[in-house]
Image (spheres, grey):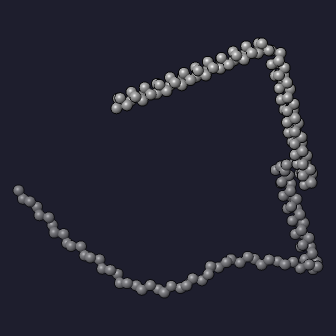
Amino acid sequence: MADDKNKVTDKAGEIAKNIWLAGVGAYGRAVDEAQGRLEKAGVEPPKLFRELVKAGAALEDEARDAIEAGSAARHSVEDRINRVRENFNLQRPARGEDLLALHEKIDRLANRVDALTDALSNSGTVKTARKAPAKKKKAPPRAKKSPAKKRPAAKKPQAAKKTPARRKTN
């Protein structure tokens, strides 16, 4: 078992070393490429700078176009929302006070309708149809069960009389 542990630790150590070496190799390659580009840029700096400026200008134009398109789309959507709100008189979202005021108006209107209905029924012009009070629903009648036959009570077995225990005499 100790040999298995040694093999595993040796293998893990080897893997860790390979990872380290791969990282060092990548760093070395990056340094070499950077030095090569620096040397090349040192020879032709104006040409490289001009190319970078040209690429930057093109990217700036693309970014401005994208921003303008996004802004136009946002304004279009906002305009549509405003038109819908105007059509439904929804300039602002409903608040709690608005809902309470609406409920109060509905209650006042219901009271006025009741008062008008009473006035018309008292004048005899209109007879109101009154609802009959709600009746309680009765449960469907149950089928009557025939009385169960009574069995005679079972006799309890009598307990055997205990005999007094004998005492030992010494």
Residue 116 vs residue 45: left or right? right
Residue at figure coordinates x 80%, y 15% from the top left? 45
Q: Looking at the image, is 32 positioned above or below residue 81? A: above
Farthest residue to the left: give it.
170
Residue 89 in the image: state x and y as whole percent.
91, 53
Residue at figure coordinates x 87%, y 42% from the top left? 73
Residue 167 in the image: state x and y as whole percent.
11, 61
Q: Between residues 35 and 8, which one lies in front from this camera angle?
A: 35
Residue at figure coordinates x 61%, y 22% from the top left? 26
Residue 9 in the image: state x and y as whole percent.
43, 27
Q: Looking at the image, is 168 positioned above or below residue 20? A: below
Q: Is residue 78 visible?
A: no
Q: Is residue 109 visible?
A: yes
Q: How many marks?
A: 0
Q: Quadrant of the C terminus?
A: bottom left
Indicate the quadrant where residue 32 lies: top right
Residue at figure coordinates x 87%, y 69% from the top left? 114
Indicate the quadrant where residue 47 lies: top right
Residue 163 vs residue 114: left or right? left
Residue 14 vs residue 162: left or right? right
Q: Between residues 138 and 155, which one lies in front from this camera angle?
A: 138
Residue 160 in the image: state x and y as whole percent.
21, 73
Q: Between residues 111 and 137, which one lies in front from this camera angle?
A: 137
Q: Quadrant of the N terminus?
A: top left
Q: Looking at the image, is 116 positioned above or below residue 39? A: below
Q: Looking at the image, is 105 positioned above or below residue 92? A: below
